[in-house]
Amino acid sequence: MAESNAYQNALTQFDKAVAHLNLKRGIAETLRHPKRELTVNFPVKMDNGEVKLYTGYRVHHNTALGPTKGGIRYHQDVSLDEVRALAMWMTWKCSLMGLPYGGAKGGVIVDPKTLSLNELEALTRRYATEISILMNPQGDVPAPDVGTNGQIMAWIMDTYSMHNGFTLPAVVTGKPVEIGGSAGRLEATGRGVMVTARDAMQRLNMPVEGATAAVQGFGNVGSVAARTAHDMGMKVIAVTDVSGGVHNPNGLDIPALVSHLAATRSVAGFPGADSITNDELLTLKVDVLIPAALENQITSANAHKVQCKVLAEGANGPTTPEADNILNDRGIFIIPDILCNGGGVVVSYFEWVQDLQAFFWDEDEINKQLERHVTKAFAQVMLAAEKHKVDNRTAAQVLAIQRVADVTLLRGIYP
Ligand code: NAD
């Protein structure tokens, strides 16, 4: 199977972790497979009157810990295998973060940048309707991922609420705060990434002030991680997005870069910086490298050229198992995705709890609780890595899988 198949990679990681656990075969087999998978083909009326057919998915990987949680991706390369992989990683992430959630993911094969706002809304409302046989506040709660945002979550919430005849904000997280979103949710993933990066640097006795960073992807996760790194006194020397990249060895002015992005829709062409490609960014000599775009960016083809000390996986699945082996052999400290970007789902959980209680917390409280969850998970992964004598990713998965296995046994096998 190709190194670029995310689901195959998720299974390889799973098998590696399970080898360190004493699971009954039937339990391991159960956890290895998605519980249910939905494929939907649905028509959307375009602005020119034409009707176009789109394909989307929603996969529930595991429900042992509770309702499933996981984002919705709009991207032209979405596939069932990619959604399966992302759903499986959500199961382990929610477990590792100590949340009462199973894992899910959804996606539509579409490049959202090619749609008008009307078309995007129509596609979203129809997809939400199609997956509403699985989605509900008690059973399956989506959130944003690549290509989706707060506005899209607002349309999903509204569509679901219209079908029920009353407002049900807890059906989706990552909503605008005006309609039941949580303070700090927009920033949560990027903040969590930098909490783990800081913990890693402290563990490695690296000073945070003045440390260099490079960030691939400047969307929700990458831009907030870069801004947080900048606010922590780090020097972000390179950033890329889908249309190009910028590099300044003295450090980029990240707030100005955010304004440049808002004005031009790309980081490319930012004044006072050289241009840089994605491949070049990934192999820059930096203290912290933050992939925050898509899967399979660090592979056997470039892992031996990666020069960071800490690899903070803002994205899900950015490193293939083959690359993992190379990086681990070279002593690069990997903060695995399910730990590094887990801050997002932690605050999504807070949003869901606030919606269910119709009682809202302030941002200081959210950030304090976010840091508490992420720091605790980081410390647990370090202990597990020492105990089992394994790399950080395997340690994180060992902990996460063990918890889901324990709960599966406690609940028993129905009937
Ligand atoms: P986003 O759509 O907001 O941003 C994606 C960014 O990646 C954009 O800047 C885009 O230009 C860039 N990009 C896309 N293709 C690229 C390429 N080939 N090369 C370089 N850059 C490219 O998405 P996001 O929400 O920031 O998600 C990014 C990653 O983080 C994904 O792996 C996602 O699954 C993961 N993640 C997101 C969240 C969240 O809360 N949004 C939580 C956990 C993990």
Image: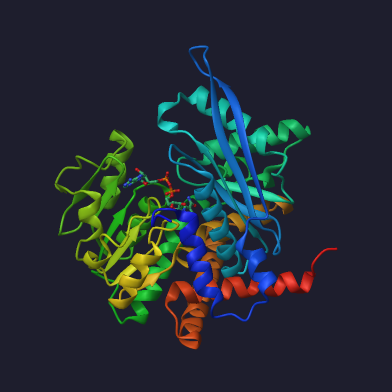
Task: Indicate left or right for 404 with 20 as reference.
Answer: right
Residue drawn where x is 35% and y is 79% of the image: 202
Q: Quadrant of residue 258?
A: top left
Q: Quadrant of the N terminus?
A: bottom left
Residue drawn where x is 34% and y is 48% of the image: 218
Whether residue 197 is visible here, answered yes or no, is: yes
Q: Position of residue 149 (x, y in %)?
A: 50, 41
The residue closer to the viewer here, 126 or 360, is 126
Q: Quadrant of the C terminus?
A: bottom right
Q: Position of residue 293 (x, y in %)?
A: 38, 50
The color scheme shown is rainbow
Q: Position of residue 121 (x, y in %)?
A: 55, 28
Whether residue 342 is visible here, answered yes or no, is: no
Seen in the picture, residue 365 relative to 72 is either above or below; the reply is: below
Q: Position of residue 272 (x, y in %)?
A: 14, 46
Q: Return the residue found at the far bottom.
A: 387
Task: Indicate left or right for 273 with 6 as reference.
Answer: left
Task: Indicate left or right for 179 with 276 as reference.
Answer: right
Residue drawn where x is 52% and y is 41% of the image: 150
Residue drawn where x is 37% and y is 53% of the image: 222
Q: Return the residue found at the far right.
A: 415
In this figure, what is the number of numbered marks? 0
Seen in the picture, residue 13 relative to 173 is either above or below; the reply is: below
